[in-house]
Amino acid sequence: MAEVGGYSSNLPDVNIPDSEKTESWHKRFNLAILNDSISTNYELAYLSLQACYDYYDGIQNDEAWGFLQETEGGDTLPAEFLNFNKIKNKVDVLVGETIQKGYDVRAKAINKTAESRRLDEKFKRLAMMRALGDLQELEKSTGMPTVPAIASQLPADEEALNEDMKNWKDYSERFITRALKAIDRKYNWGYERVALFRDILIAGRAFCKVEIQEGMPKYRRVDPRYMVFDSFAKDDFLSDSSYFGELYYMTLSEARQKFNLSKDEIDLVRRAGAEYNRGFRYANEMLGPQNGANGSRLQYVWEDQGKALKVMVFYAYWQDNKRMRYLETEDKFGNKHYKSIDEKEAKKAERKKKGKVVTRQIKIWRKCTVIGGQVVRDWGEMENMIRSVDNIADTLPPYVSLIPNYMNFRGISKVEQLKGLQDLKNISMYSLQLAMARAGAKGFVYDVAQCPDEFTPQEVISQLKVTGIALINSKKDGVPNPYNAFSEFDMTISSSIEQYLHISRMIDQEMSEISGVNEARQGVNQKASQAVGVTQQMLTQSALSTELYSELFRQFSEKVMSQIAGLVKIVGEDEEVWGPIIGDDAVDFIKEDIDISLQDYSVFIDVTPPILEDRMEFKKSLDIALQQGAIRIDDYLDLALERDIPAGVERLKAQIKRREAEMAEQQAQTQQQMAHQQAFMAQQSQQQKMQDDMAKERFKGQRQMEIEQERDQNKKEQILLKSRVDEPVVTNQKQ
């Protein structure tokens, strides 16, 4: 069977035992989804989406406008049918605004256990605030340090505490947030979000697949042209769609390498293709001959003339129900948690009485891939299904979807609304070219019968060009001719040109109103004297018409990141996985006694101001920090080159804290040095005083010795003098 339609589009029964859900059952379900999609006009939807992408790219097929370019006789008219593409510019403006707006990802734990931890932290801080006064008095009276270091970070009152707790994050929330930002950088969400938003504007729908690859959660944009889904879904996010699928064509050699096909399987696919090969040349690889089953032009296998054999590869995912065993446990806060276990683990838990084993009917997703309508690969239950700890029965599909204004089982894109006006503009501009090509010069009609006999018509034309005078003979042959020889005619550009330009401007205005991108939004201001308030009003009104798409896309992005957070829980807390890309937060979190698998997280995408404004504000903050000495010049130069503004702000905060710590350390060292210096100076002063005292004592002793010596000398002199006075007087005998 090489043509689609070999199975009934009625989906197989899911209310059968799991033992009967074999490979054959999965194959039937896969092909039933494919045929159900065909019956809901998948091919028409594909052609419509392809046309939208062609209009955006400016790819046009002018065969449809052949009646404009040829005369009834088959002659080609003197004009070229051009595509004056206005659609691409308007789409690019909206995409550019999305690029210009920044975004910030933050995760918040939303389960009961996380709320209990939040309340514990709040009461802990509140108790510290109320005891702070007593601790300060105790420290003053005893002189012992009793006030903890965290006291300086406490808010002033309870109202400020409530505001602080709104932004408080425990280790698990910081871990998930850092993990999401690391995955953002690793797989370039910045590009993926641009491509997905462009899909919404062009195709009117966007699909993103979330899965675990090579041990890491990953997101992947899916081309809307190749997606199938349950068209009876009821909301813009297709939240109740019962199945999804991806349909691709690839060469047999590619399929053999990707799915490791055996020789027998390749022969099976080849035989199916040979039986139904009709040798058609197709307009594109997607479509085959128009005589497929169920009105389908798709084939499982087809071969273009002179080209490789193409095989259809269809990936299908669908909902199912299953009875599962869970181990029910209760934490210290009284909250119940459930962990999936098998029969062996259930018996072990009952034997050791570790918890209560419960059985529940839960929703699961199944998968199956069929190559060429024949070979089955990757079938069974889908791995890594995301579940809430508070509602284990529900799970999410692997695809996150968005179709804005999904009503009457379809949505209409911006490009689809503009296609007719774009065609009309091209026709008007083609007619303008024709009018210009047919335009000639201004001239007059000259009656050669009135030429003088000595002049030929060529000489009259030459004389007219040289002297600017035309000579005639009004009485030629003797009969006066009352006819005016000069009859003017005008073949220059006529008023029809202005009419075509007016029509073109009217079409541009209609396209601006439908797309929501007017001239003010494109930066075009034809009235230089137009008031600023008028321009701002035009910008505001234009933005309101596209705000729906921006808001829905923000919610879509939150759903993608929330599912990534769910997969982060499944990957677990392996330090070897997260440590290199997250850093200290991963290590700190792993040290905490928090089981990440028992947490639920909601992810919020905060749309920040335009990046240019953010960068200017960030530059101002850097300048202020440098002027105040909060950062060094080398830190300033490094941070000025940061492209990620939120990351730059975090780095700036870290640099300021590091600088404050360095300055505090330097101040402490300076104070210590001053204390040492003062002690040294005091010691030097004491030593100098001691030396002075010793010198004084030595001087005093020396002086005392000198006084004693002088006293002794005086005594000696007095004794000598006295001795001399007491000596008898000796008279002269000779007298």
Image (cartoon, grey):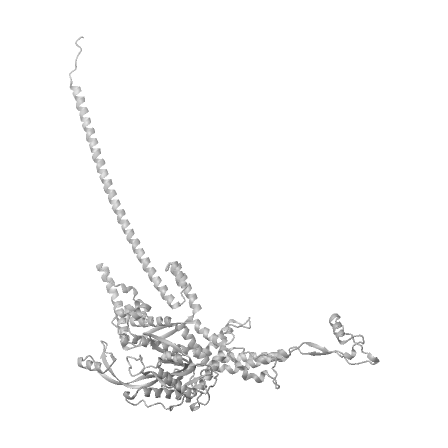
* Quarter holding residue 631: bottom left
* Quarter holding residue 173: bottom left
Q: Position of residue 595 (x, y in %)?
A: 26, 74
Residue at x 17%, y 22% (from the top left corner) = 722
Q: Which residue occupies the foreground of this view, 166 or 334?
A: 334
The answer to whether residue 459 is left or right of residue 554 is: right
Quadrant (top left, top right, bottom left, bottom right) of the C terminus? top left
Q: Is residue 579 above or below residue 662?
A: below
Q: Is residue 696 above or below residue 51?
A: above
Quadrant (top left, top right, bottom left, bottom right) of the N terminus? bottom left
Q: Position of residue 557 (x, y in %)?
A: 38, 76
Q: How many marks?
A: 0
| Residue 231 visible, this orientation | no
Q: Which residue occupies the foreground of this view, 153 or 414?
A: 414
| Residue 592 visible, this orientation | yes
Q: Position of residue 693 (x, y in %)?
A: 23, 40
